[in-house]
Amino acid sequence: MTRIGSGSGPEADRREQIIGQLQLRRAAPADARAIAELAVSGWRAAYAAILPADFLAGLSIDARETAWRQLLDAATNPEMCAWMAELDGIPAGFVSCGPPRDADLARPTAEVYAVYVRPDLIRRGVGRALLGRAVGQLLADGATDLVLWVFERNAPARAFYEAMGWRRDGARQELDLGGIRSIEVRYRLASG
């Protein structure tokens, strides 16, 4: 179990009262549906001001479930890892990570691919616990440099990553999602 609400004072106490105990465990193919639901609800909540409403409404949980089931299959993706956060046995969020996908990066760099938390639990310590677990595992596995991508216009997510010690490294990429071109910026967390 991971205790949420680290630190002291009224803010930490309030988080503990809201969250209490949060269980983090390795995700498996059987978690694909829950992860798909968390990802779709996360996209709809986080990107409402960034991506077109019809694009977000058209996100398919079924299609994402199929994709996640394949991604979580250790036989086909042995280097990919994901963790589920559960609160009272109910999915609260997930994180996924693995080898870097960018051509300019090589091992021992690793990448955090996604961190999504149930919208009603945002700012309650779930994302911090998940990201902390992923970072800890990647570093334990030998990564010396960690990266992740975030929409440039996603100010809350960027503030979250920056509060966790991540910094922009200057890389940018343009995505076409729903007919809208959106810029992502890369963040980096050096282990030393």
Image: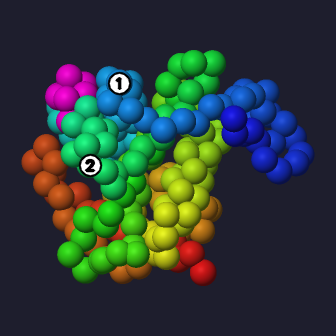
- Name the spot of residue 159 as percent of width and height, x first: 54, 59
Q: Earlier in the sequence, mark 1 or mark 2?
A: 1
Count neighbours of disc 1 (C-alpha within 10 A) and say few if under 14, some if 14 to 19, many if 20 or more: few
Marks 1/2: CA–CA distance: 15 Å
Residue under numbered circle 1? 30
- Name the spot of residue 91 as percent of width and height, x first: 50, 25
Count neighbours of disc 2 (C-alpha within 10 A) and say few if under 14, some if 14 to 19, many if 20 or more: few
Task: Please tell me whether mark 1 sits on a helix, a strand or a loop.
Answer: helix
Q: Is residue 48 visible?
A: no
Q: Is residue 131 left or right of residue 185?
A: right
- Name the spot of residue 137 as percent of width and height, x first: 53, 57
Q: How many marks?
A: 2
Up the image or down, 131 lies above or below 147; here it is above
- Name the spot of residue 126 as percent of width and height, x first: 60, 39
**Is 95 in front, or is 15?**
95
- Dividing the picture into quadrants, the one containing residue 46 is top left
Q: Quadrant of the N terminus?
A: top right
Up the image or down, 25 lies above or below 57; here it is below
**Is 82 in front, or is 176?**
82
Residue 103 within the magenta-colored segment of the rendering: no
Q: Are marks 1 and 2 in contact (CB under 8 Å)?
A: no
Task: Please tell me whether mark 2 sits on a helix, a strand or a loop.
Answer: loop
Residue occupying image coordinates x 22% and y 45%: 76
Give the magenta-colored segment's residue range.
Answer: 58-67
Residue occupying image coordinates x 42% and y 44%: 82
Q: Main secondary structure of the magenta part?
A: helix
Residue under numbered circle 2? 77
Q: Indicate the amino acid at tag 1.
A: Ala
